[in-house]
Image (cartoon, helix red, strand yellow):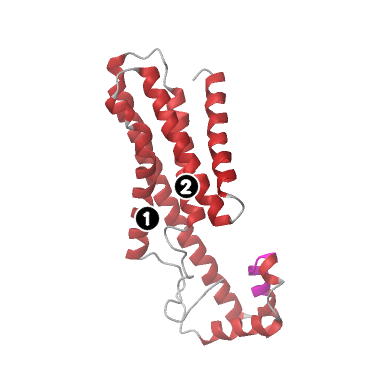
Amino acid sequence: MNMNTSDTAQTTREPVLNPVDRISEMIFGLLMALSFIGAISVASEEAEIREMFVAALGCNLAWGLVDAVMYLVRTVTDRGRALSLAHAVRRAKDPITAHGLLNLALSKTAATLFEEREVEAIRQRILAMPDLPARPKLNVQDLLAALAVFLMVVGATFPVVLPFALLDDVVMTKNISRGIALATLFVAGLGLGHYAGYGSWRAGLLMAGLGCVLVVAINLLGG
């Protein structure tokens, strides 16, 4: 819950490259790529390898597009939630009612850290804002941020499908592609672990292990 007078229609947006959100999206894309690779039949003819590359690349582009669109959906939803809260606080009949609305908007952990005077200070800041718009809106910066998300997700998963453009042996191509995906999952896990502060290597191995489990499951299902 973070508002300012310079942009009353918006909550303060987290950076586009927020470690948890962005690395998580990369991991989802990599797991999706692993699923696609597992669905490729080993019996496929060599002539179909290029078609597989096109299909895999198209799948990654589609995943990046979905991520970009969902980023915009999340942005406008969060912005609308904060805007609705601000309107509700302004319409509150008394400070106690407004304090209750603000406390409900805080997470359980954050609510225990705020004293009543601090909640009142937030209420006063909301009351001091200029006129608020009726609905949340997206701007050019939001569209550029969505484009950045698209490029990042596609860039992270492209190396996984690249072997299909360079090799003709289906088995070797699948194994190399899986190896790249697992190595990238390990690196992504390192990033998450470092950000969370609970052990980079442990998180890296956990993510790589998750990828291995997915590969085994796909193989058992006939992939």
Q: Is residue 32 something one can see in this rendering? A: no
Q: Is residue 115 visible to the viewer in this orientation of the structure?
A: yes
At 40% from the left and 12% from the top, the residue drawn is: 43
Disc 2 marks which amino acid? Glu
Check the image and report above or below for 187 versus 169: below
Depth check, front residue: 209 or 17: 209
Residue at 68% x, 85% y: name it: 117
Three-letter residue code for mark 1: Ala
Q: Estimate how packed mark 1 is, as few (under 14), some (14 to 19) or many (20 or more) residues with alpha carbons within 10 Å.
A: many
Q: Which residues are magenta?
A: 101-108
**Residue at horizontal 45 percent and vertical 23 percent from the top:** 39
> Left or right of 62: which side holds 99?
right
Point out which mark residue 25 bears: 2
Q: Nearer the viewer, residue 17 or 222?
A: 17
Is residue 70 a member of the stretch shown in magenta?
no
Mark toward the start of the polypeptide (1 vs 2): 2
Q: State the residue in front, 67 or 14.
A: 14
Question: Is residue 110 found left or right of 181 in the rendered image?
Answer: right
Percent x, y for residue 44? 36, 14
**Placement of 8 over or under 16, stated as above or below:** below
Name the spot of residue 164 as percent of width and height, x first.
Answer: 32, 26
Disc 1: which residue: 146
- Which quadrant: the N terminus? bottom right
